[in-house]
Amino acid sequence: MKPAFFKIFLSCFLIGACSFQAKAQAPPVTRILFIFDASYSMWGDWQSGTKIEVAKRLLCEFLDTLKAVPNLEIALRCFGHQTPLQPTVDCKDTKLEVPFGPAQKNVKLMINRMQTIQPTGTTPIAYSLGQAADDFPGSYGRNVIVLITDGVEECDGDPCAVSLKLQQKGVILKPFVLGIGLGTMFADLMGCIGKFYDISSEGNFKAVLNMVVSEAINRTTVQVNLLDIYKKPSETNVDMTFYDQGSGEIKYNYLHTINNRGNPDTINVNPNSRYRLVVHTIPPVEKSNIVLTEGKHNTIILDAAQGSLALKINSETTPRPLQAILRKKGEKNTLHVQDFSQIENYLVGKYDVEILCLPRIIKTDVDISQSKTTTITIPQSGILSILKQTDGSGSIYLEDGKKIIWVCNLKDRLSQENVVLQPGDYRLEFRSKMNQKSESTLERKFKIESNASVTIRL
């Protein structure tokens, strides 16, 4: 090969390699398809005007802020705006009004088109989602749908099934659903379509849009590692809340999950806030002043080793409803009230357990160990039936060696009273209101056995 030809060949090779490298390292395009509800119900009143007027104005104002966002393409699809409800309902009334293009160009096109749209028809959400699959170009990118609606599906489609199918095929990421004045009661109904946000007022419309688009564009991710006593991130299935450190506003609320690869799940979080994270174990654990690195995968680590406590009644019959108060060892604050026959998770450590039977049973230094279940079993109770001929005052006491311990007072005006008691030796003290002398006190000793009844006549 001649030297001159070799130089030309080398230059072309290097230029081509650099060009290929630049393309390979180019950030992926994010595509956001806004699906806008222009059905007849949007003529309904909403604070300062009709829903359609307010929603169009706020959405157009928001779109104007996207012009300078790099690597962003946007498009607009509307439904319920082409065919009147009468004489027949058109369940295919949806149209891609502005195809995908760079935000710098499409913002103006979308605003112009939005201003001319008038609500006329029905709400074919499922059909619109299905048609949206063909709106996205085939080239690589992050495809996101933002559905803005004031109602639910009015045709025969299943928007949840359509959305899930698009996600499973990799056509789109999980959509965002913005409910205009729907209320939180629709969260379950609409939440199967995508991540649901209740826009209860005009004031939070653009705030929600900002949060949604930021999450769609931003690739800042977070992994929360909840460590066991062996410093492994094995703890999971507990709710966790991200608060804005300054304002205290709830930003994100997720149930912690370990994915099918055995790793804590990854979530997308806006990096432009300082966070306080509360993990709702019992008792809760938290970390404050969390700063995330934008565009990176961030890991937040908290110690959250847990074991469990089971409360049982030693009985072959169906036990009466019973609860117990859980407190940290030596502390007065109530952490939790646990039902019997249930198992609850707690942080590893020592606890005091007060069982709300009569008389109270106090268990101290109850040890909760990593990934183990500590069981407290108490005897089945018995029943004391008291028959009174007159009103009066009285109390029940437990005999404990050489002393008696107050258990409860009797109800003054009941002629018949049933008291559920733990097995043991007791005394009942009673004085009729007709007798005003202490020496007129009646005393009855009795014994309570599990699953048995005792009757005392006064």
Image (cartoon, rainbow, N blue to C red):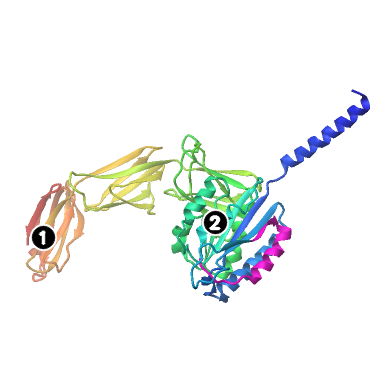
Disc 1 or 2, which lies upstream in sequence? Answer: 2
Residue placed most toward the observer, 234 or 20: 20
Q: Name the residue under label 1.
A: 386
> For the residue marked with disc 2, what is the amino acid?
Leu
Look at the numbered disc 2 and give the secondary structure of its residue: helix
**Residue found farthest to the top:** 1
Q: Name the residue under label 2.
A: 129
Look at the numbered disc 1 and give the secondary structure of its residue: strand
Crowding around mark 2 (Cα neighbors within 10 Å: few <14, some 14 to 19, many 20+) is many
Does residue 51 appear to the left or right of 458 in the view shown? right
Crowding around mark 1 (Cα neighbors within 10 Å: few <14, some 14 to 19, many 20+) is some
The magenta segment is: 97-122
**Is residue 188 shown in magenta?**
no
**Is residue 100 shown in magenta?**
yes
The N terminus: image quadrant:
top right
**Residue 37 lies in what quarter of the image?**
bottom right
**Residue 55 lies in what quarter of the image?**
bottom right
Query: Alpha carbon of mark 1 to alpha carbon of mark 2: how far?
Result: 69 Å
Residue drawn where x is 52% and y is 58% of the image: 127
Does residue 66 appear to the left or right of 382 in the view shown? right
Residue placed most toward the observer, 75 or 296: 75
Q: Position of residue 112 (x, y in %)?
A: 69, 68
> For the residue marked with disc 1, what is the amino acid?
Ile
Q: Where is residue 196 in the image (x, y as percent from the top left)?
A: 51, 58
